[in-house]
Amino acid sequence: MLVVNPHACPQNHRCPLISVCPVGAISQDGYKLPVIDNDLCIQCGNCSSSCPMGAVEES
């Protein structure tokens, strides 16, 4: 299960990971913490390898 660490994510911009997810499993309300829908997630690793802050973690 992947999650976004709120201490590593600055939450002050539109999350760039939304566009790298091939199945649309990442959503964000405004500039709030992005959320990964693990029911949709296919564990491809695009988000964890693309996050410049290293905020995507295995839970």
Image (cartoon, helix red, strand yellow):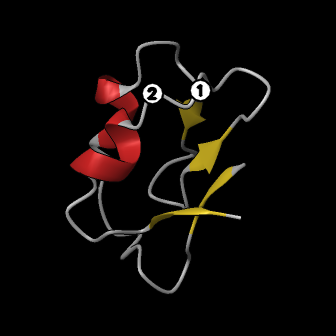
Q: Which residue shows up at 54% across the image and 34% down it?
A: 26
Q: Amino acid at mark 2?
A: Cys
Q: Quadrant of residue 33?
A: bottom right
Q: Residue at x 50, y 86 (%)?
A: 7
Q: Quadrant of residue 20?
A: top left
Residue 32 placement (x, y as % from top left): 54, 61
**Residue that carries the numbered disc 1 in the rendered image:** 25
Whether residue 52 appears in this view of the structure is yes
Side of 21 relative to 58 (left or right): left
Q: Is residue 26 above or below residue 30?
A: above
Which residue carries the number 2 mark?
A: 44
Q: Considering the numbered disc 1 on the image, is that residue within a helix, a strand or a loop?
A: loop
**Which quadrant: the C terminus?**
bottom right
Res. 14 in view: no
Give residue 11's position: percent from left, percent from top: 41, 69
Distance from label 2 to label 1 (Cα)?
A: 11 Å
Label 1 crowd (10 A; few <14 / some 14-19 / many >=20) = some
Among all residues in the image, which is located at the extreme top? 23
Q: Is residue 33 left or right of residue 38?
A: left
